Image (cartoon, rainbow, N blue to C red):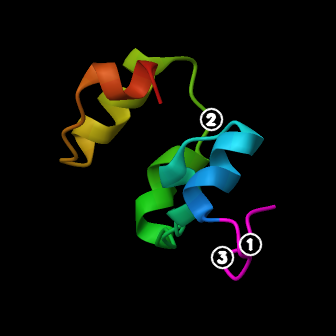
C-alpha cells in the first residue's frame, strides 16, 4: 500500500490513502507467550479477569481490561 521507494513522499501517500503517517512506519513487536498467557483463558468479564490476574500477583488497572 505505502511504497517507501516511490518518488511520491510517504507523507503524501498516507494523506492520499487516508491513514495516519505513524501507521506507515509502525513495526509490530512480537508478544511473548508469557504476556499472552493471562488472556488465553476464558473469562466472564473484566472483573473476573482482574481477580484471576491479582491471584497471580499481576496488577492491571480495570480500565485496561475493559478498554483494550
Apparent side of residue 18 relative to residue 58 in the rendered image (left or right) = right
**Badge 3 element:** loop
Q: Which residue carries the number 2 mark?
A: 42
Front-lying residue, 13 or 21: 13
Q: Which residues are magenta?
A: 1-8
**Which residue is at the far front?**
7
Disc 3 to disc 2, C-alpha distance: 41 Å
For residue 4, the mark is 3
Label 3 crowd (10 A; few <14 / some 14-19 / many >=20): few
Q: Residue at x 66, y 76 (%)?
A: 4
Q: Residue at x 26, y 48 (%)?
A: 56
Disc 1 to disc 2, C-alpha distance: 40 Å
Front-lying residue, 30 or 4: 4
Q: Position of residue 21 (x, y in %)?
A: 52, 50
**Could you say which quadrant of the image residue 42 lies in?**
top right
Q: Position of residue 17 (x, y in %)?
A: 76, 43
Label 2 crowd (10 A; few <14 / some 14-19 / many >=20): few
Contact, CB < 8 Å: mark 1 with mark 3?
A: yes
33 versus 65 height, above or below: below
Q: Which residue carries the number 1 mark?
A: 3
Amino acid at each position: 500500500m505505502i511504497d517507501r521507494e516511490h518518488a511520491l513522499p510517504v507523507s503524501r501517500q498516507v494523506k492520499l490513502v487516508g491513514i495516519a503517517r505513524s501507521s506507515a512506519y509502525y513495526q509490530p513487536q512480537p508478544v511473548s507467550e508469557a504476556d499472552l498467557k493471562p488472556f488465553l483463558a476464558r473469562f466472564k468479564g473484566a472483573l473476573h479477569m482482574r481477580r484471576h490476574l491479582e491471584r497471580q500477583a499481576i496488577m492491571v488497572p480495570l480500565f485496561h481490561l475493559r478498554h483494550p
